[in-house]
Image (cartoon, rainbow, N blue to C red):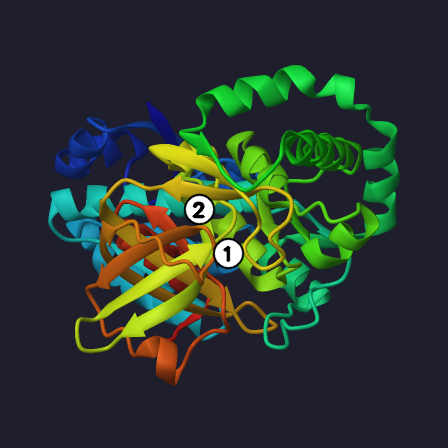
């Protein structure tokens, strides 16, 4: 059961022994879902930073206590106040004082079912932010030259999100790739080929060389302690005689290491943030066709984590007609589209829809998905946050929207 610290503020006129009985209704309800740890406000300085804590306003007359200890309050400051013992009145005063000093605050009050739901959302956001903070994103080769609106400021990203980008030369990956023998990956290639629905265009040696690249990137990720990586595939292909990263990135995502292509800094952050928040792998894709009459778009790319597919076909990479590309057959149903953009990573797009068809256009990247959106598709024609967007299976709009809003991001529609 999830443990919540209740940092308790109560007036000296309010006996400590009566705190529980004074708020028995709300506390009893919370104890159905959470393990409550009551912490006197004088002891909150000793709480570990990775603990989830709420400020429990147990009575009126505590405003100056909070003011005197505000530096130790959790950020943002979420106050639980059921209204008994003048607790809501005190919380209102405190909230105004905190916001006047640039601190975010929120009061949990009202119907108990809604309070419980809100706590679960806040807890999920808190844990996601913890998982995200301290992450390292490897940028292998510089971002692709055509990504003129997909940059991210390294310093601002670290300050806002606690995420560090680290540059890694493509030549280093190529050297490791060259050191890996074909015999080292032969068994893995046979296993993968046996799982594929079909193998088209590509040759056995393409599969072997792509698997060697996967091993090289995996070794780099381990050496650099990476949480995620993005690869300038075109530059790396020049160094490896035409081997693209499509298969390698698919397998890395299956391993739980968030991996994206083209050196897209904004999209790899989006993929990492969504994974930290939902635990779901994502599909990084190009919006390739848009139909405003039917409110549909087709997403496409040549790589996708194999675990996201119902079946997959080993193809060639679409643009170069070389190496290995993945044609994934995806399950229909609810999907969520998301993108965190701008150089400061402080804007986001979010929409839900239904995956209705796995298309097979010959002039598009190999994995293709037709999606009917629940919001106007003309966003992509009016105010897009650059090209690449991220899709995940299921409806996660509420939790993702809450997360980005809590982190001060502006929604673009």
**Which residue is found at the position 31% from the left and 72% from the top?**
290
87 lies left or right of 279: left
**Residue 13 in sight from this viewpoint:** no
Quarter holding the N terminus? top left
| Contact, mark 2 vs mark 1 (Cβ under 8 Å) | yes
Q: In this view, does 302 lie to the left or right of 209?
A: left
Callout count:
2
Residue 288: give x, y in percent of width and height: 41, 67
Q: On the image, numbered disc 1 is attached to which residue?
A: 270
Q: Quadrant of residue 172?
A: top right
Nearer to the camera, 93 or 10: 93
Labels 2 and 1: the sequence-earlier one: 1
Question: Relative to 130, does residue 307 appear above or below in the rendering?
Answer: above
- Above/below status of 159 relative to 257: below
Give the image location of residue 187, x and y in percent. 64, 15
Determine crowd level at label 2: few under 14, some 14-19, many 20+ residues with C-alpha closer than 10 A. Answer: many
Q: Can residue 111 be seen in this view?
A: yes
Dot 2 corresponds to which residue? 282
Residue that appears at 36% across and 32% down: 311
Where residue 320 sits in the image (x, y, percent)?
63, 57
| Relative to 72, residue 197 above or below | above
Q: Which mark, by number, is residue 384?
A: none
């Amino acid at each position: 059961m999830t443990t919540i610290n209740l940092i308790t503020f109560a007036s000296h006129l309010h006996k400590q022994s009566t705190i529980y009985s004074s708020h028995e209704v709300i506390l009893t309800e919370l104890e159905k879902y959470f393990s409550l740890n009551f912490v006197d406000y004088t002891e909150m300085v000793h709480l570990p930073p990775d603990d989830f804590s709420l400020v429990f306003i147990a009575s009126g007359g505590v405003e100056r206590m909070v003011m005197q200890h505000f530096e130790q309050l959790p950020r943002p400051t979420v106050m639980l106040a059921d209204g008994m013992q003048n607790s809501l009145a005190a919380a209102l005063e405190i909230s105004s004082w905190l916001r006047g000093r640039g601190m975010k605050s929120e009061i949990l009050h009202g119907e108990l079912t809604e309070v419980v739901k809100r706590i679960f959302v806040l807890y999920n956001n808190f844990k996601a932010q913890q998982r995200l903070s301290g992450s390292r994103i490897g940028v292998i080769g510089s971002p692709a030259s055509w990504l003129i609106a997909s940059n991210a400021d390294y310093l601002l990203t670290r300050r806002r999100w606690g995420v560090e980008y680290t540059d890694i030369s493509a030549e280093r990956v190529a050297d490791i790739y060259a050191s890996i023998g074909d015999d080292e990956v032969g068994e893995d290639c046979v296993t993968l080929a046996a799982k594929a629905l079909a193998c088209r265009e590509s040759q056995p040696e393409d599969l072997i060389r792509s698997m060697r690249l996967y091993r090289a990137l995996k070794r780099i990720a381990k050496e650099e302690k990476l949480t995620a990586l993005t690869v300038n595939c075109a530059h790396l292909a020049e160094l490896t005689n035409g081997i693209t990263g499509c298969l390698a990135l698919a397998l890395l995502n299956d391993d739980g290491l968030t991996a994206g292509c083209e050196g897209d800094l904004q999209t790899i952050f989006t993929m990492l943030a969504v994974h930290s928040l939902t635990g779901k792998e994502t599909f990084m894709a190009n919006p390739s066709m848009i139909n405003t009459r039917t409110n549909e778009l087709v997403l496409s790319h040549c790589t996708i984590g194999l675990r996201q597919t119902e079946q997959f076909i080993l193809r060639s990479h679409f643009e170069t007609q070389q190496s290995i590309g993945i044609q994934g057959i995806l399950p229909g149903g609810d999907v969520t589209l998301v993108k965190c953009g701008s150089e400061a990573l402080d804007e986001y797009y979010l929409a839900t829809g239904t995956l209705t068809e796995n298309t097979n256009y010959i002039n598009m990247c190999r994995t293709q998905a037709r999606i009917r959106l629940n919001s106007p598709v003309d966003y992509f024609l009016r105010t897009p946050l650059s090209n690449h967007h991220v899709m995940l299976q299921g409806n996660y709009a509420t939790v993702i929207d809450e997360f980005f809003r809590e982190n001060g991001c502006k929604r673009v529609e």
